[in-house]
């Protein structure tokens, strides 16, 4: 037993640092899952995909889609509230 263990220290459990980083807002769920995928990756394609998760690429793509959908919703609502009239109607 080491001197640190004699004083109450313990070895970290598998994934403990990643879990703590996620719990404290240092990593997103996507990034935490990417780390797990990176550890489990067996092919270069799996490694590349896991790296993209860790880098947050999926989250950025989802955020861009959310913004686009929000913009489209606002346009639809504006057209419902203020319909355009054709030149013949005026």
Image (tube, grey):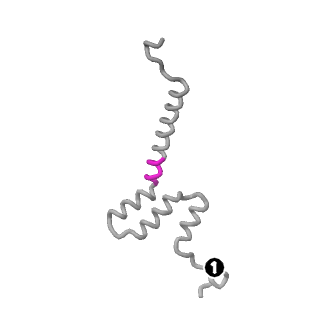
User: Label 1 belongs to which residue?
Assistant: 9
Q: In front: 26, or 59?
A: 59
Where disc 1 sits, the SS reads: loop
Residue 7, how many percent across, how many down?
67, 82
Residue 17, how many percent across, how many down?
55, 68
Residue 22, how many percent across, how many down?
57, 61
In the image, the segment drawn in magenta is 56-62
Examine the image and state in which quarter residue 37 appears: bottom left
Q: In front: 27, or 78?
A: 78
User: Are there few (<14), some (14-19), or many (20+) residues within 10 Å of tag 1?
Assistant: few
Queried whether the magenta region covers residue 85, the answer comes back as no
Residue positioned 37% across, 64% down in the render: 47
Q: Quadrant of the N terminus?
A: bottom right
The correct choice, above or below, for 13 with respect to 26 in the image is: below
The correct choice, above or below, for 78 with respect to 9 in the image is: above
Queried whether the magenta region covers residue 59, the answer comes back as yes
Residue 66, how many percent across, how many down?
49, 43
Most distant residue in the left direction: 44
The correct choice, above or below, for 22 with respect to 77 in the image is: below
The correct choice, above or below, for 75 with respect to 32 in the image is: above
Residue positioned 36% across, 60% down in the render: 48
């Amino acid at each position: 037993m080491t001197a640190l263990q004699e004083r109450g220290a313990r070895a970290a459990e598998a994934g403990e640092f990643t879990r703590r980083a996620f719990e404290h807002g240092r990593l997103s769920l996507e990034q935490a899952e990417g780390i797990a995928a990176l550890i489990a990756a067996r092919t270069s394609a799996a490694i590349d995909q896991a790296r993209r998760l860790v880098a947050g690429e999926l989250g950025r793509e989802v955020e861009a889609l959310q913004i686009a959908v929000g913009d489209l919703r606002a346009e639809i609502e504006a057209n419902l509230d203020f319909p355009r009239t054709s030149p013949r109607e005026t």
